[in-house]
Amino acid sequence: MPKAEFTNQVRRFRFEHDEMTQQDLADRCGCTRQTIVALEKNKYVPSLALAFHIARVFGVGVEDVFTFDE
Amino acid sequence: MGIWQKRAVINAIIGVMATVGFLVAGFTGGGPGGLVEDTARRNIAAAFVAFGIFSNILVTYLTRHRPDKPSTLVDERDRAIHRISTEVSLRLTVAAVFLGCLILYETNAEAGSISANWVWFMGYGVFLVSNLGWAVPAVLMYAGVGGRAEG
């Protein structure tokens, strides 16, 4: 299986939504701010549930926020 | 810093202190071979291990998730890192016991017996390997070293 590369646009969407803070996004998704930080630095791949939570906060689809390249 | 990251950092610091103290007590004044006869040195080495174990229990209790305190929230990334570091700790502990037994066998095969001192030393030492084997990988993963965790 070829190595997969996960990337995301969480930071961009955050800024586009009234410059939402990492803490605010974390509170809405039920995770810690440190997890949001790790996500934005591509140091963490979220579960499906968290990915859906984040996408719904931004009012977009999961694939608009998260990208999966092979 | 999240509550479980604090747990990992504190346990790593305590683990290093306990390990250094245990090794210094174990290898000075004649090495582990003389621990049965040297009660004072044996008690000091055991005290360092006890310090490590009880501190670990206390820190685990103090860093538990409390629903009434949002600052103690534990999320999927914490659980993922905890899961990986627990597995690393298990494998390191197994490896340490295996290597210890093998080294003792190779160095004592001709004599046909192993000093009880070494068995005591290994028994206590395994606790420290287990603790450090969990705490250090957790600290590194929280710092983003060695790839990324997946939820």
Image (cartoon, coloured by chain):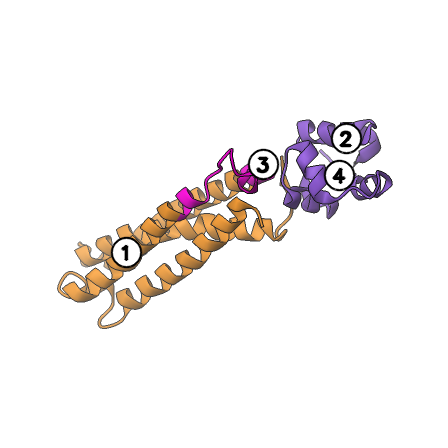
Chain colours: A purple, B orange
For residue B67: magenta? yes
Could you tell me if the residues under marks 1 and 2 are in contact, i.e. CB atoms within 8 Å? no
Query: What amino acid type should be assigned to the residue bearing mark 2?
Result: Val
Q: Which residue is mark 1?
A: B104
Q: Nearer the viewer, mark 4 or mark 1?
A: 4
Query: What amino acid type should be assigned to the residue bearing mark 4?
Result: Phe
Residue B52 quadrant = bottom left
Q: Nearer the viewer, mark 2 or mark 3?
A: 2
Q: Which mark is residue A6?
A: 4
- Identify the element where label 4 is drawn: strand
Could you tell me if the residues under marks 2 and 3 are in contact, i.e. CB atoms within 8 Å? no
Looking at the image, residue B79 sits to the left or right of residue A69; the answer is left
- The magenta span reads B59-80
Query: What amino acid type should be assigned to the residue bearing mark 3?
Result: Asp
Could you tell me if the residues under marks 1 and 3 are in contact, i.e. CB atoms within 8 Å? no
- Identify the element where label 3 is drawn: loop
B2 relative to A67, above or below: below
Tell me whether marks 2 and 3 sit on the same chain.
no
For residue B91: magenta? no
Q: Chain of mark 2?
A: A
A9 relative to B131, above or below: above
| Residue at left offset 25%, top offset 68% | B31
- Measure the alpha-carbon separation of dots 1 and 2: 59 Å
Q: Which residue is mark 3?
A: B75
- Measure the alpha-carbon separation of dots 4 and 2: 20 Å
Of residue A69 and residue B53, the one placed in the foreground of this image is B53
Q: How many marks?
A: 4
Q: Residues within 10 Å of mark 4 (few under 14, many from 20)?
A: some
